[in-house]
Image: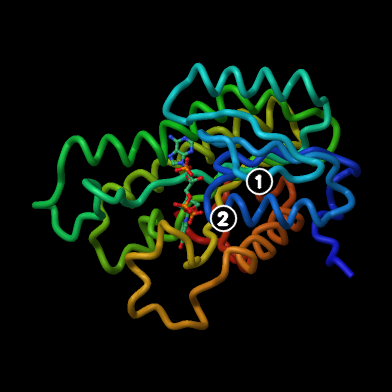
Amino acid sequence: MTEKLLGSFKKPFDVAIIGASGGLGEALVNKLLTQETVSHVFRCSRYMPKTALIRSSWVELDIENEETVIAAAKNIQQKTKNLNLIVLATGLLHTKDKVQPEKTWKNLEIENLIKILQVNTVGPALVAKHFLNLLPKGRKTLFAALSARVGSIEDNKLGGWYSYRCAKAALNMLIKTISIELSRKNPDAIAITLHPGTVDTNLSKPFQNGVPIQTLFTPEYSAIKLLGVINTVTTADTGRLFAWDGSRIPF
Ligand SMILES: NC(=O)c1ccc[n+]([C@@H]2O[C@H](COP(=O)([O-])OP(=O)(O)OC[C@H]3O[C@@H](n4cnc5c(N)ncnc54)[C@H](OP(=O)(O)O)[C@@H]3O)[C@@H](O)[C@H]2O)c1
């Protein structure tokens, strides 16, 4: 039998996953579609997925292009008044050619810094700007952005990865600040950031050497854990950064 994961939400309800084409985004979509309480999943991504899935539809969205974010939000708003969960699963750590996490400040490059901030911070800000008012009032609703433990300033013991750390720290502040305004405008709505663990996806592939196998999660395992955290948190937790196991990570 399929484990029930989202019992704290008023059922049935719809979900939007932004970055549905990524390792974690895809795993979240698949897991959500096993839940009877979820009526529809909007799979938001830049490119059309190769496979169609039941109870879901594709919505074009490039987080680097505000016009597409606006169009995606309008499109979803026309289709549902019941969007109780939005998960932002986009992110960038490296590209095949140019962008690599910096080992030293000597590697800092304007173009790479801007690119990493654009995808990890500016894009999520645009999504929040146009999607937050889609969350209905009077019931538990939640906006979660996938962040990373390395964005915690207090937790930074190793250094390196300058632009990614900065971008995720800024993302944490963005969501914290949003959570304050959101609780005034929509008191039952929650906004949090989440650390998924080290997960076997394209993002982590080049950096998996030395990661003990038991701490390298499959996307499916991480998705189940993240949905567990999403289910457990309440309005008292809004604005916070949580790890996959529900523990709170300091900023
Ligand atoms: N994997 C880990 O170990 C790990 C650890 C800590 C935190 N995280 C965080 O978890 C999140 C998901 O990462 P992942 O591991 O699933 O990485 P991934 O497989 O590389 O997926 C990244 C996603 O971001 C999307 N994206 C990038 N630029 C975009 C844009 N301009 N517009 C729309 N979508 C865009 C990608 O879309 P395309 O398919 O179109 O490129 C893809 O869907 C990220 O925020 C990451 O920082 C991951």
Residue 154, picture quadrant: bottom left
- Does dot 1 land on a helix, a strand or a loop? loop
- The residue depicted at 85 percent of the width and 62 percent of the height is 4
Label placed on residue 87: none
- Quadrant where the N terminus lies? bottom right
Amino acid type, residue under disc 2 in the picture: Leu
Q: Dot 2, crowdedness within 10 Å: few (<14), some or many (≥20)?
A: many
Residue 118, image x, y percentages: 36, 34
Is residue 21 visible in this depiction of the protein? Answer: yes
Return the residue nearer the eye: 152 or 84: 84
Residue 38, horizontal then vertical, whole percent: 83, 46
- Mark 1: give few (<14), some (14-19) or many (20+) Cα within 10 Å: few
In percent of width and height, residue 62 lies at 49, 30
Read off the residue under disc 1: 51
Q: Nearer the viewer, residue 219 or 87?
A: 219
- Using the image, determine if residue 121 lies above or below residue 66: below
Note whether ligand 1 is within 8 Å of mark 2.
Answer: yes
* Left or right relative to 150: residue 10: right
Depth check, mark 1 against mark 2: the one in front is 1
Tell which residue pokes out farthest to the front in this image: 50
Q: Mark 2 sits on what residue?
A: 24
Q: Is residue 216 left or right of residue 137?
A: left
Say which of 55 and 12 sits in front.
55
Furthest toward the left, the residue is 106
- Label 1 sits on what residue type? Thr
Is any atom of residue 141 visible in this view? no
**Residue at the image position 44 percent from the left and 46 percent from the top:** 91
